[in-house]
Image: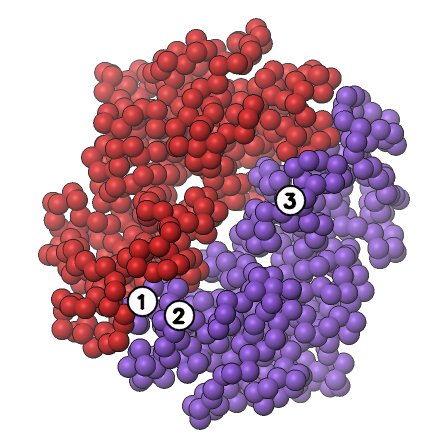
Chain colours: A red, B purple
Amino acid sequence: MAVTQFNPACSKPRLHSSQLSFLPRNLPRHRHCSFAPLRRTQHARISCSVAPNEVQVPAVKTPDPKSKAECYGVFCLTYDLRAEEETRSWKKLINIAVSGAAGMIANHLLFKLASGEVFGPDQPIALKLLGSERSIQALEGVAMELEDSLFPLLREVSIGIDPYEVFQDAEWALLIGAKPRGPGMERADLLDINGQIYAAQGRALNAVASRNVKVIVVGNPCNTNALICLKNAPNIPAKNFHALTRLDENRAKCQLALKAGVFYDKVSNMTIWGNHSTTQVPDFLNAKINGLPVKEVVKDHKWLEEEFTEKVQKRGGALIQKWGRSSAASTSVSIVDAIRSLVTPTPEGDWFSSGVYSNGNPYGIAEGIVFSMPCRSKGDGDYELVKDVIFDDYLRKRIAKTEAELLAEKRCVAHLTGEGIAVCDLPGDTMLPGEM
Amino acid sequence: MAVTQFNPACSKPRLHSSQLSFLPRNLPRHRHCSFAPLRRTQHARISCSVAPNEVQVPAVKTPDPKSKAECYGVFCLTYDLRAEEETRSWKKLINIAVSGAAGMIANHLLFKLASGEVFGPDQPIALKLLGSERSIQALEGVAMELEDSLFPLLREVSIGIDPYEVFQDAEWALLIGAKPRGPGMERADLLDINGQIYAAQGRALNAVASRNVKVIVVGNPCNTNALICLKNAPNIPAKNFHALTRLDENRAKCQLALKAGVFYDKVSNMTIWGNHSTTQVPDFLNAKINGLPVKEVVKDHKWLEEEFTEKVQKRGGALIQKWGRSSAASTSVSIVDAIRSLVTPTPEGDWFSSGVYSNGNPYGIAEGIVFSMPCRSKGDGDYELVKDVIFDDYLRKRIAKTEAELLAEKRCVAHLTGEGIAVCDLPGDTMLPGEM
């Protein structure tokens, strides 16, 4: 069944008669109008709340993969930004898909995206929220709160549980959703369970997203999830996929600042190498404090070698102990940082870390994995790997270890990347403390 | 016992010998240095985590009411913003105190304040977090996440449980903390319990805050809490105290937009009159849609009179049903809106709602209560009440009802405002659905 998308702002509404009484009569007539039929799948719910917002229509399955995710409430309106003086100079609206949209990280992130602090004050956005069957009600709650926030730049919100609907024309896909690790679950189990999700989402992105969609994978194990995702999306450049290691980078900067007794804005050139796991390598060889090599500022090299990495990695666990919750707020800040690093030029001489596809890297790291490395961007959404980094034996040795782990993870998900039969020979538990 | 505040960035640190090995040796010498002794009260904990950050020193009581709240971690550093090129042009740092700082609303709000989206990109801020004995660990968790977020504008974070410490020199006090209503608790009980808290916080503001501190009360019952607070702070202008009705205003705008089928940015001049309770009056007589009176756009006057107010008020309850949590994110957005409305000029012809002291109001509303009314600001932190509003019998009647409720609440807290013996004759339960 196709349901007409209700747009009372248009001059010739084709509406079900029961809706006509709610039509205002003297609205301006300059709006751009479209009455595209909104097809609904079996999973969809009707919640377009232009009064009355409690309408329930039986949902019917349709095989059309191009059907839109459900618009929500006030965001079901169409309009022409070019027709209004205050919005005429705005950029073209961009679609941002977010998975795990009912979770706590997204609950922080969505409001940051909608406020304009990420993409700027002249960039209208559409948020496409992907949830699960279980979380669809919560997604409606999130959409209600977004309505009540009156963000001028937030022009569309739609919710759904089918990635083929939600990822339609997405220019950004922020993939936060993942199953948390259950009791007794090994990393291999988690790789398989979440790998399935990311394989499906990769296929969906491949089918319906913008051909140049930028993908940031947050759900763990994020490096290998990103690898699975990109392998299932052969029509999207592999370079467009990122695994989030920015929170690790931020924490590493903060710990170096604390140690050196400087404010954190004095720490630069911080690389996280490798996996978002306990084998990750926060690089104090290339990092700088006040423009000087860290080892010249922090003379306690024993601390750098033996305590610094642990300090960075234990941060999440310490936080859960103190605060009783995982680090949703600072994770969402780090996602904002990761996006901003791609859409604004990297400051001269500095760089940022991101888990990216390793093919063609200048560091001698194995190809075919998603590995966190130092990047620079011109602000066009793309990035280049930084060439002028140095290595010593200590750094090389640790990079080799996280590389070996990622290669083992890759073998463990071969069934999900189209590379044959999976063989799992993972080392011990390398989940970061405090991570799900 | 006084503990020296550790500042390794200074040239002549006076430190405990156990800390000396952590001192970096080649830090720039241009910093402004101060080694004010940091007195600690019996409640205070030591968590200044410039290495080693696990130091535990026995806390000793001191009667000095001017002692600072505990600085946290990297925020314990002192520095001179004038000495750095990139921060030289910044405004003077402002102190923002937040109570209920370990709660969910604050968890959204603090990161918005720190990001610069509220006070602007050249306004460094100090966050002073007030919690309770029970939440002090959680406050440390919040401070850790703020550290890990590397916000350049966030220069100081301190945490504490004594308002006389935390409110020291506060230029803004955002008072979110309040006891939630327990099972079987009447509004009168809540008025007393939270009234005690707000009386104490008013006295503390009176003693130690900036003489022109702006206070926004969010904790419920917020109007009467604000009244109690201002009555206990006679040296601070009563005009500086606000009770938050901005979320109600935002929701009212959204519901009118939904009804009219317009985007929410087309709704203006929305007043919430009176109490933040079910007697509140969202004013559709003066509100406008696309510059036209609402009643000319929404012809369904029965809906306006009989359903609109309920729609606004049921929003919080509906959200809890859907999302399983109260509206922390949109509440924090509305606090940001409320602050911004005071620090940026109100757009020509528009206004905003705030619960303010009713003395001298031009509407004939009883004096001596905190009543939500339409305000305009020049952006200097102050406001004027709007004069050109109209009334009809329907609006007058409803305003009288919410006024009567606030006068009854006032009689109920007379013991907290220095006005004699409390007499409680409150009407039925008027807590908004979904509010604590």
Q: Name the residue that disc number 3 marks.
A: B154
Locate residue B80, reporting x and y percent.
76, 39
Q: Is residue B40 left or right of residue A15?
A: right
Q: Is residue B126 left or right of residue B11?
A: left
Q: Given contact means CB atoms under 8 Å apart, are the residues at marks 1 and 2 in contact? A: yes
In front here: B85 or B148? Answer: B85
Q: Name the residue that disc number 1 marks.
A: B262
Residue B87 visible from this viewpoint: yes
Q: Secondary structure at mark 2?
A: strand
In front here: A402 or A70? Answer: A70
Residue B256 vertical placement versus A309 (above, below)? below
Which amino acid type is marked by label 3?
Answer: Leu
| Mark 1: few/some/many CA within 10 Å (<14, 14-19, 20+) | many
Question: At x 36% / y 77%, what residue is drawn?
Answer: B292
Chain under numbered label 2: B
Which amino acid type is marked by label 1?
Answer: Val
Q: Secondary structure at mark 3?
A: strand
Q: CA distance from mark 1 to mark 3?
A: 38 Å
Disc with the residue nearer the chain's start (1 vs 2): 1
Residue A95 vertical placement versus B94 (above, below)? above
Q: Name the residue that disc number 2 marks.
A: B267
Chain under numbered label 3: B
Locate residue A274, reporting x and y percent.
46, 20
Residue B49 visible from this viewpoint: no
Residue B36 sits in quarter: top right
**Which is more foreground, mark 1 or mark 3?**
1
Question: At x 39% / y 32%, what residue is drawn?
Answer: A381
Residue A370 vertical placement versus A394 (above, below)? below
**Which is more foreground, mark 3 or mark 2?**
2
